[in-house]
Image (cartoon, rainbow, N blue to C red):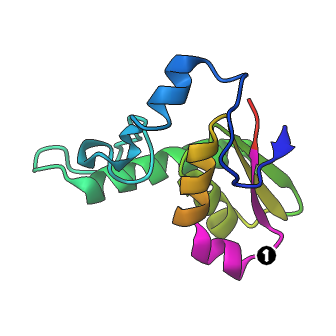
Amino acid sequence: MREDTGAEQERPGIRPAVRETYGPLDLGHQPMFGGGFINFGYWQGIDLAGPLGEDERARSQQALYRHVLDAAGPLRRRRVLDVGCGLGTGCAVALTEYGPDAVTGMDIHPDQLARAREEQAVLLGEQPGRLRFAEGA
């Protein structure tokens, strides 16, 4: 793992399919993947009978992170690593709701890290030193 500076440069270790999927073909900006994650979420407590939009998807995805973080146990005075952090939304949930000392979001793709920094700019500014993003796999 290395600290990502956000500088655009070629990454020889990234497979071409990964480079394309999380670079120019990133699905995270598509409405069907709205909410900051590309996963299926955790739909318990969300009414599936009505129309499902970006808000419901975002809540389901945040609920998935909460489900996993609850299973990890108390996070106070601990450091958290989110591997494959994407837009960093899971990092934000961990940091703001579970109170660890620090959260590192790690992703293989520099474009994802740039998007994470953009999406989490307010939190990065409000919690200096507690949230960072690093390149790695």
Residue at horizontal 32%, vertical 43%? 33
* 135 to the left or right of 16: right
Residue 49: x %, y % from top left: 11, 44
* 27 to the left or right of 84: left
Residue that carries the numbered disc 1 in the rendered image: 128
User: Is residue 18 shown to the viewer in this render?
Assistant: yes
Residue at horizontal 68%, vertical 72%? 124
Residue at horizontal 72%, vertical 23%? 12
Considering only vertical position in the picture, is 1 above or below 100? above
Considering only vertical position in the picture, is 66 above or below 136? below
Looking at the rendering, which quadrant does residue 6 occupy?
A: bottom right
Residue 65: x %, y % from top left: 55, 47
Does residue 130 show up magenta in the picture? yes
User: Is residue 75 shown to the viewer in this render?
Assistant: no
Looking at the rendering, which quadrant does residue 55 occupy?
A: bottom left
- Magenta span: 120-134
Which of 96/12 is in front? Answer: 12
Residue 31: x %, y % from top left: 25, 49
Q: Give the amino acid type for the residue marked by disc 1 in the picture.
A: Pro
Residue 34: x %, y % from top left: 32, 51
